[in-house]
Amino acid sequence: MERVEPARGRRKAEHMADTREALLAAGRDLFAARGYAATGTEDIVAAARVTRGALYHHFSDKADLFRAVMERSAREMAQRLIEQETARAEAHPEHDAWTTLRLGFQSFLDACADPSFQRIVLIEGPAVLGHTVWDSLVDQHGYVLLAAALTEAMREGSIDELAVQPLTRMLAALISEASLYIARAEDQARAREDSGRALDRILAGLEASPRPTHRS
């Protein structure tokens, strides 16, 4: 009897985890394809092949499910970019921290073209949950890494020494606005090109001034 109960508990936990994953997957597909407003809870439970009771067991309402979907999308994109930039750094050991960061910003702008990420995180996210939640995602998935990269760039002497916290906030806001501009543009390819050029020009202004040489 003692062996039966743990096994039953494991099966129940696995079933609950599978149900939650099915809801997240269905929500992600539907929110990306139709948008939040056009997706009903009946559509979600039908696509996930679960009951409405199961939906409300795991999430308080449709907005709660959407928030979980948006957070997962942002987390996965952040992880993808980290892996991409890590591979780039290994392939180009000559790049300093500042070069790596500037290239990473451009990679993020490229990622904004991903239809699912664009619709769920960049367009629907701020509209459905408000900019406070959206800004917290920026903090959660990018602030710490950005601050660390800036600190390293200053240590290397690639950029002038400035207060890291306000600089990180400003650059995070800059990249966020650039991503929203691209997502909402009619000509996204042009918006991506223009945003990338403007962003890199702004970042160039942070580069350390060349030290004067003293003649003997």
Image: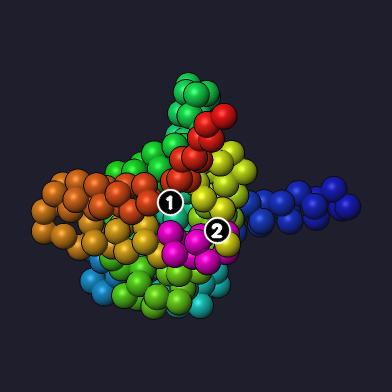
Is 112 in front, or is 95?
95
Point out residue 31 in the picture as x, y percentages from the top left corner. 31, 62
Q: Secondary structure at mark 1?
A: loop
> In this picture, is 174 found above or below 103?
below
Instruction: Rate crowding at label 2 as few (under 14), some (14 to 19) or many (20 or more) other CA atoms within 10 Å.
Output: few
Point out residue 37 in the picture as x, y percentages from the top left corner. 26, 74
- Reading the image, the residue beneath label 2 is 162
Q: Is residue 10 left or right of residue 91?
A: right
- Reading the image, the residue beneath label 1 is 206
- Distance between the Cα atoms at labels 2 and 1? 9 Å
Prevalent SS, magenta region: helix
- Numbered range of the magenta stretch: 164-172
Hey, what amino acid is under mark 1?
Answer: Leu
Is 92 in front, or is 181?
92
Residue 120 sits in quarter: bottom left
Residue 27 sits in quarter: bottom left
Residue 157 sits in quarter: top right
Residue 88 appearing in the image = yes
Tell me the number on the disc at residue 103: none
